[in-house]
Image (cartoon, helix red, strand yellow):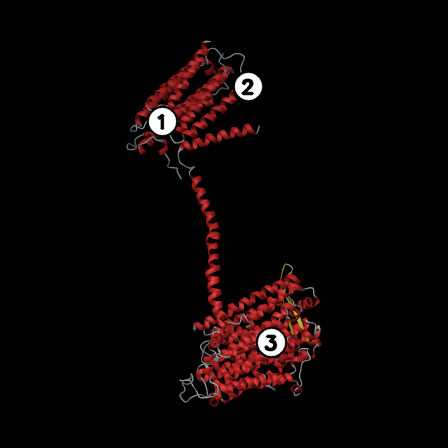
Amino acid sequence: MSVGLEHYLVLAAILFSIGLYGALAKRNAIVILMCIEIMLNAVNIAMVAFAHYVNVIAGQVFTIFIMVVAAAEVAVGLALIITIFRNRKTVDAEKYDLMKW
Amino acid sequence: MPNAAIISIILLPICSFLIISLVLRPFFNHRPKLSAYTTITAIAGSLILSLWALASVSGAEHHVLTNVSYHWLSIGDTVIELGFTMDSLAAIMVVTVSTISLLVQIYSLGYMKGDGGYARYFAFMSLFTGSMLGLVMANNLLFLFLFWEGVGLCSYLLIGFWFHKPSAARAAMKAFFVTRLGDFGFLVAVIFLYAKTGTFNIGELHEAALAGTLGGTALTVAAIGIFSGACGKSGQFPLHTWLPDAMEGPTPVSALIHAATMVTAGVYLVARMFPVFASSDTAIMVVAAIGGFTAIFAASMGLVAHDVKRVLAYSTISQLGYMMLGLGAVGMGYASGHLDEHTAMSLGVAVAIFHLFTHAFFKALLFLGSGSASHATGTFDMMKMGGLRKAQPITYATFVIGSLSLAGIWPLAGFWSKEGILHEAYHYVPVLFWVAMITVFMTAFYMFRAVFLTFHGTYRGGEADNHGHSHGLHESPKVMIIPLIVLATLAVVAGWLPVGNFLGAHTHFSFFGVLSGWMAWVSILFGVAGIALAYLIYVRKWLSADSIRASLGPVHTTLIRKYFIDELYERFIVMRVLINGLFVILQWIDTHIVDGVVNGVAAVTIRTGGVIRRLETGQLQVYGLAIAIGILAIIACVFIFS
Amino acid sequence: MGQQVAFWILALLCVGAALAVVYVRDIFRVALFMVLCFLAVAGLYVTLNADFLAAAQILVYVGAIGVLIIFGIMLTRESKRGSPTGKLRPAAMLVAFLFMATMIAVIVGSEWYVASEPSSGATTTQIAQSIFDKDGFILAFEIAAALLLAAVIGAVVLTRDKKDK
């Protein structure tokens, strides 16, 4: 069976869903960050698959930019988590509820 | 006579009230006599205008001088007017009211001397006189009701004049509440009549009733509603309980309001609306029955009363019952077909109003006389009085004249008016004729019981008069005696005036000719018998009052406790049925259902808010979940709707 | 043929690593599984003829992001907490499953426009030309650079010690 575009797209969908689940269900803030990275990677896979099968290089260019943004986001995100950890001594996302009613 | 002059009859006392309350009382309270003079001047002016009106009416066409209406306000299709009429009925009433009022005001100059509320008293008296005059001159029911309430208000204010006395305050409230019950029926009837006929105007209502456009049950209901108002004001059974207690007010108040004028407003109302009543068989039977019953019922309670004003109060209720009886008898004559319409309408009014006219004079006289006696002795309790005829000869003489007139002895005024009523009762409702006769006997008895207890025998009171004079009892000052003399004269001659004819009926008996009939002798006989019995018991003491009381113990108790009706009303109906029964239920409904709904809405809102609030957890992941669900929802919508 | 085998192996590896990220308790192991996932993705790029991107993936994700994450884990050590699941687990599972189902349904049901011939050849030059040529993505490139700068500065500012100003 030849692997076509759909296979890669389905793989991307599965990865994205797993990442989504993890981002919503895990309590450790760093793990949430990791799951967000997984989601971004899933999107990257889709992009590159399109670039390959539609024969347009723009897909790979987009992927580069997504990587850039992901890197920046992880940096800032981790900085935030560390700062909060210094104040709250916890990385439990359920404990971050200052905006609660 | 110009309309302005006619309307001034009402305006003069009203202006007097305004002047006293706005100018004299605030600024001139140190000269109280000014209030008295203002009132007397105003009412004298009203009297002169009333006499002029009376003279003009007799010359006027159909005996109607004027019937004008001024547009007051319109609400949608309803037009409310200020309307005045001056016909023979109104003319008689205004003359009566202003005469008695004037004499009472002059009397009050002396009686109320030294009282702290002098100015207030005369202000209320002016207002009352103005309202009463307006009441009898109103030509539509709504306007009449306005003045009706006005006199009720003044009655309340004047009964409770010495408001720091708890008994007076309570009596005033009682008067107001009991008459209120009647007024409620009256108002409902007025509105009901308006709904059925589209008018408040009395003349138009008469036409509707006689023509039959307003008939059957509607007419009966309306008539009984109006009659309930009349019962309240005139103290007929079962709304009579307030009148004896109303004697807490000053004596001139009792003389004016609760003898001669306000209580007669009920009779006036029935007389004014007589065509409406006579056209309904049921209603007119109710009027006659209640009138007759009240006459004998009240007289029975007067037999045992100790307080002279109470005796007079019961006497008033009884005599008002007589007047209702007269109206009822004529009405039943019309209903049974013995009388034709034209005769019946004026006859009914004539007999009742004639008696009202004479009664006003001798009853006011009796009240003022009792006031004079209490002025000397400091009390109204007849058991503490006695032997006053030597100390107060003029008071005694006038009192006796008044009593004879009340007992219906020929040729005094009361005889003529009573004959009129008895004559009609005999022809159309014989059973009430005999009831009336028994009442004549009882009336004469209790009246002369009062005379003998107060003026004959020896003085039983301990202390002297309330002036602190140590040299014993003396006659009252001239300013109090002169009205007594005037009223006594009227109590003799008023019956000789052709009032009945003036009111359109041909009822006048000839002076000596009346004695040729058997009825006159029977009524005189009953009266004399009553006087004689009283004489035997209280002067000659052949029969001991105490032994009679002892042997008829239960009867006496029932009478002196007013047939326990006050207990029935206050303890049973008000306390048990209403306060502990109905009102508890209503209170429960109010707290739990009405408030429950309101509070419930608030509680539901708060609880819903409390639930929805939980969405706002402040946790990022919850918000993220919400976003994800939202995206899914959008996708689903796109799928479904494309 | 080789591509297919590679795809399947790498795909399974990737999904397995991702699942491990979500289900394993110990954070450090989680981080390592994430790195494994990135490596698998890099492999997938190779099968998709994205050679430059594969290298960039390993450099950026594994090298930088993965290390950053491990540093973060080290600095935020909580006493034996690990990586528990929150109370939104059932809802999240449902939502994620629905997402996946929807997307797969759309993917499988859609007509994808596929070029007659897939891409081939080295991509570095093509990417460079796409970015830096006339009418290329040069603006996006510059903005991305600025973004990186801002992020770095932001991260430094956030975490510096307040004591030394």
The three-letter code of the residue at mark 3 reads: Met
The three-letter code of the residue at mark 1 reads: Ile
Q: CA distance from mark 2 to mark 1?
A: 39 Å
Residue indicated by mark 3: B323
Q: Which mark is residue C69?
A: none
Between B515 and A41, the residue placed more toward the observer is B515
| Most distant residue in the top direction | C1
Position of residue C150 measured from the top left corner of the image (x, y, whole percent): 39, 27
Position of residue C64 measured from the top left corner of the image (x, y, whole percent): 36, 20
- Judged from the image, the secondary structure of the residue bearing numbered disc 2 is loop
Residue indicated by mark 2: C111
The three-letter code of the residue at mark 2 reads: Glu
Kindly identify which chain the residue marked by label 1 belongs to.
A
| Mark 3 neighbour density, 10 Å: few (under 14) some (14–19) many (20 or more) | many
**How many discs mark residues in the rendered view?**
3
Between B417 and B426, the residue placed more toward the observer is B426
Residue indicated by mark 1: A30
On the question of residue C56 being in view, the answer is no
On the question of residue B576 being in view, the answer is yes
Position of residue B429 measured from the top left corner of the image (x, y, whole percent): 64, 75
Relative horizontal placement of residue B560, taking residue A33 as reference (left or right): right
Mark 2 and mark 1 on one chain: no
Mark 3 and mark 2 on one chain: no
